[in-house]
Image (spheres, grey):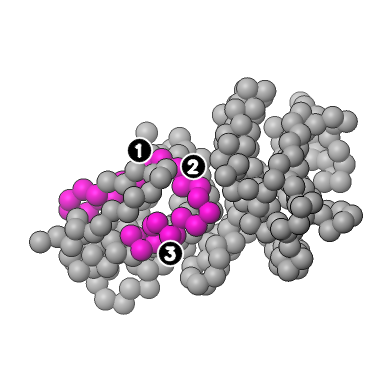
């Protein structure tokens, strides 16, 4: 049984979140609330822990529909990448699916790749 | 045609701003003002790229101004957008809580030591190394993703003005 797909998806006002078996999470909308960590930090941590428990080789985080975010939301992706990077045991590749047409994704995932390229992959759609 | 040099931050681009707004420092206004800025830049200058840059500059400067505003009745924010046809300038004036001012000065001085891309990467590394601290990615993001240079002026009455100037 997959722990990944059993993770409880939070309700967030401006973002839609869909979990798809076996290893994909898709976020669409915008993230500009004062503290997006309140809604999402625990969710991302739960996905990370579930991916380790399921021994997934890859997690796909599709953010291509996330049209605008603030820097507090970008911080959440930095944290997720850091958890994977710092994992001592078996770890997975965190693959971000991004859009070439969304400016924040081009700049931020380039920076994120330089931080943890050994555990990250960035795939471009559109 | 040669590109014009960016004017010094203290030099006003035009006698009258294209946009001038005053409002209470409330988080609830930021999304609306950012999207107005997107619409305004897209409509006035006709480029989506500039509209996207405007969104980053407005979101992050207004977030900082709102987060750290004093609770005084005089703490209203002022936003202006100006252009001389070659450059664009976004300027946000606020009355910050005094305890935040030293941190802001240090952050602005630190930014100047690195080029925009290096500064953004350095901010990511700092965020990764300090998971319990606040993100502090915003100012570096404004410079790199917004394609602007930042300056801070301290004005009378404890107000500060953060100005972001870049090419159109």
Horizontal and vertical percent position of residue B26: 63, 48
Q: Are marks 2 and 3 in contact (CB under 8 Å)?
A: no
Residue A1 location, quadrant: bottom left
Residue under circle 2?
A68
Which numbered disc flags the more N-terminal residue, 2 or 3?
2
* Dot 3: chain letter: A
Which residue occupies the foreground of this view, B62 or B9? B62
Taking the spot 19% from the left edge, 55% from the top edge, the residue there is A5
Same subunit: marks 2 and 3: yes
Residue under circle 3?
A79
* SS of the residue under disc 3: helix
Q: Can the viewer see residue A124? A: no
Residue under circle 1?
A125
Magenta span: A19-44
Front disc: 3 or 1:
3
Which residue occupies the foreground of this view, A106 or A71? A71
B56 to B40, vertically: above or below = below
């Amino acid at each position: 049984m997959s722990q990944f797909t059993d993770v409880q998806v939070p309700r967030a006002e401006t973002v839609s979140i869909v979990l798809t078996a076996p290893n994909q999470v898709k976020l669409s909308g915008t993230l500009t609330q004062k503290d997006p960590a309140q809604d999402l930090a625990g969710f991302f941590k739960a996905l990370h822990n579930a991916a380790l428990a399921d021994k997934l080789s890859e997690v796909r985080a599709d953010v291509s529909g996330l049209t605008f975010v603030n820097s507090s939301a970008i911080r959440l992706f930095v944290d997720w990448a850091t958890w994977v990077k710092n994992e001592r045991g078996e770890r997975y590749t965190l693959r971000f699916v991004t859009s070439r047409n969304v400016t924040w994704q081009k700049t931020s995932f380039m920076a994120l790749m330089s931080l943890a390229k050994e555990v990250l992959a960035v795939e471009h759609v559109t | 045609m040669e590109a014009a040099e960016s004017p010094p931050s203290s030099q006003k681009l035009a006698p009258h701003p294209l946009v001038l707004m005053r409002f209470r420092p409330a988080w609830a206004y930021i999304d609306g003002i950012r999207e107005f800025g997107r619409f305004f830049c897209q409509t006035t200058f006709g480029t989506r790229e500039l509209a996207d840059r405007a969104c980053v500059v407005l979101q992050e400067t207004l977030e900082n101004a709102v987060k750290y505003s004093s609770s005084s009745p005089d703490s209203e924010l002022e936003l202006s957008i100006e252009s001389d046809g070659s450059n664009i300038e976004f300027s946000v004036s606020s009355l910050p809580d005094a305890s935040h001012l030293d941190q802001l000065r240090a952050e602005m001085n630190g930014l100047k030591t690195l080029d925009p891309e290096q500064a953004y990467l350095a901010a990511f590394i700092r965020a990764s190394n300090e998971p319990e601290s606040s993100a502090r990615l915003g100012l570096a993001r404004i410079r790199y993703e917004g394609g602007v240079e930042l300056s801070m002026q301290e004005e009378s009455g404890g107000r500060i003005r953060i100005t972001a100037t870049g090419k159109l």
